[in-house]
Image: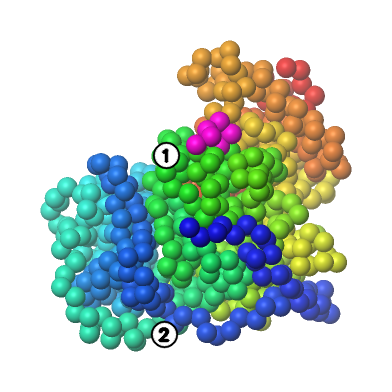
Amino acid sequence: METVIRDVGRMFAKPVVNVETRGDGSRILRSGIPLPDTYARCVGEWVEKWGKETPDQLFLAERDAVSGEWRKITWGETRRRVIGIATWLLGQKLSAERPVVILSDNSIEHALLMLAAMHVGVPVSSISPGNSLMSRDHAKLKGNIELLRPGVIFADPVEKFAPALAAIRELHDGVVIAGRNSQPTAGTVPFAEIEVAPDEAAVMAAFNAITPDTIAKFLFTSGSVGVPKAVINTQRMMCSNQLAKELVWPFLKENRPVLVEWLPWSHTFGSNHNLNMILRWGGTIWIDDGKPTPAGLDKTVKNLKEISPTVYFNVPRAYDMLVPLLREDKQLRETFFARLNLIFYAGAALPHHLWEGLEDLSEQTTGHKVTMVSSWGSTETAPMCTDCHFEAERPGVIGVPVPGTALKLVPSADKLEVRVKGPNIFPGYWKQPDITAKSFDEEGYYMIGDAVEFLDERFPEKGLLFDGRVGEDFKLLTGTWVHVGSLRVAGIDAMKPVAQDIVVTGHDRDEIGFLVFPNIPECRTLCPDLPPDADIIDLLLNPAVRQRVRQGMALMKQIGGGSSTYPSRALLMAEPPSVEAGEITDKGYINQRMVLNRRADLVEYLYQDVVDKTVITVHSAI
C-alpha cells in the first residue's frame, strides 16, 4: 500500500511570486515557476495513455439505481467503449454548430459520451440538471438549447426529463439518447445502441486532427451574475491548466488521486478541475450520489464510510453539514481521514470554526492536522488562476498565481480588481461577440469582476485573499463602504452553528442587516425541548436559536471597527434559498443580488420603524 504524503514540503512546490509595479498603480503578479508548452494536445491523449498503460485500473464507479451496489469501469474498458461511441457520433453530422448536450447528473454513461465526443473533436455541453428538473417554465434550458442547437441530447432516466424535453422539442433537430436507467420511450435511442462496432481508423483520424484550439466544451455560467452564457472551453485551456496543477501539486505523481465526488460536471469545478485531474493522472472517481442537502447527505455519508478519498473537494456548505457528523461517527471519521492528503474548498471562504473543526478531527483521528487549501478562478479560466500550494496561515487564502497565468491588480475605489491572462483563459462566449468584447481590457486581460487583497503585501508568496465582487459592495448612508464578502464569512463564524449562509443588507441605509439562512439540524440541537419534527417557524422563534444569533451580532459589534463591520438587525429565513429562482446555484453558492431582489419585501420588513418580534436586534431582549 502506498504511503500517504502529508508533509507540505513534499506535497507542494514552494510558492514564488514575481511582482511588477506600474506607474498607474496597477501591479502584475506572476508565478516564478514557468509553464512550458509541453502540455497535452487534448484530454483524449490521457484516455489513450491510461487505456493502454493501466487498462485494469479503476476509472469510475457509480451506485446502481436498483441494487445500490457499485458499478465500475476500468481505464481499458473506458477507452474501448469511447472508441465505439465515437464511431457512432461520426455518423451524426456533429460539429460546434451541432454539439452534444447532456442534461443528466454525473454517471458512467455521462463520462463516456463526453469523452467520446471530445475524442473526435465534437464539443460537448453538460447542462445543469436543475435547468431541466427544478424549473416550471424551463426558460434557462430553452435559452441553452436555442443557443447551441445540439445534434445529440442525452438524458437519464429519460422519462424524468420528459417535461424538459417537450419544452425544447422545437428548438433542435437532434437525436435524444436514453440512458440505461430509462424505460423504453418512443422517439429516443437507447444508450446501448450507440455503442457500435468500433471503426478505429476513422475515430483516430478525427482524433489526430484535434488541435489545442479545438473547442472541447461549452460550459454555461451559473447565472450568479446576469444571463447565463455559453463559455467556449478549448483543449488548450484545460490541458495547460492541468500542467499548472501538476507543477504546484507534485504529490499527485506519487499518490494517484482517488475522489468521492458529487460536484457536477456541468460546472468547471467538478468538470475541468476535478475530472480532468483524474484524467491527467489515471486516477479514480467514486461518483457520490449524495449532495450537501438534508435529503442527499445520508448518501454522501454512506459512500464516505465505504471509500477513503485521497483528496476531498467540496464547497463550504457541505463541510458545514459534514463536520457535526464526523464528530459523532467514529467509523465515518476513520474512513474519511485514512489516506487523505488534503481538504480542498472553493467558491466561498471556509468559516474559521469549520477550519478548526476539520483540523481537530483529523489530528484526533490520524495524529496529523489535515492540510486545507483553496483556489480561485471561473468557468472562463478552465478554472484555476490561483492555487494555495502551501500551508495557509488562515482560512480564505486563495493562493498565488499558477504557472502561466498573470494577474493584473487594478485599484478600483478602495479595492483591488483582479484581471487575468494566460493559456487557460477562454477565447469568448459562443455567438455573443458583443459581450465577449466587453469582457477583456485593452491588454487582453479577462475582467473577471472579482477583487482580491494581499494577506501580507510585504510577502506576496503568503497568498491573496478573495475580497468579493467588485460590484457587490455598497455604501451606507454615512458613505462608509461595506465589504460584503468578508462580512458574510465573519457573520457565519460569529453565529455558529445557526448560520449556514448570510445575505448582507443595508444599501443606502443607516445600518447593516443580515438575512440568515439557518442550519436547521444544528438549530434543532440547540432546542432539545422541542419535538424532533417541530415546525420550522417554531424552531426559528425559539429563544435558544435567537439568543445564539444575538450573541454573534454582539460579538461582531464588540470586535468591529464601526457600523460597517457588524449587523444591527437580522432575520432568520424559514424558506431556504431557491435554486429555481437563482438564489443559490446547485453547488451551494449564494447569489447575494438575487436574494435581495427576490426578498425585497423581507428587507423592507427588516428595516421597518416598529421592530417585529421576528426581527433580532443587537440590543433586543430575548
Residue shown at the point (49%, 64%) measured from the top left: 256
Q: Residues within 10 Å of mark 1 (few under 14, many from 20)?
A: some
| Amino acid type indicated by mark 1 | Lys
Q: Which residues are magenta?
A: 325-331
Predominant secondary structure, magenta span: helix
Q: Is residue 551 above or below residue 116?
A: above
Lateral position of residue 429 relative to residue 179, left or right: right
Pointer 1 residue: 302
Residue shown at the point (69%, 53%) measured from the top left: 396
Lateral position of residue 276 relative to residue 516, left or right: left
Instruction: Give residue 211's mark.
Output: 2
Which x, y percent locates residue 215? 41, 76
Are dots 2 and 1 in contact, CB under 8 Å? no
Q: Is residue 508 or residue 238 the one in the foreground?
A: 238
Q: Secondary structure at mark 1?
A: helix
The reply to whether residue 150 is visible in this rendering is no
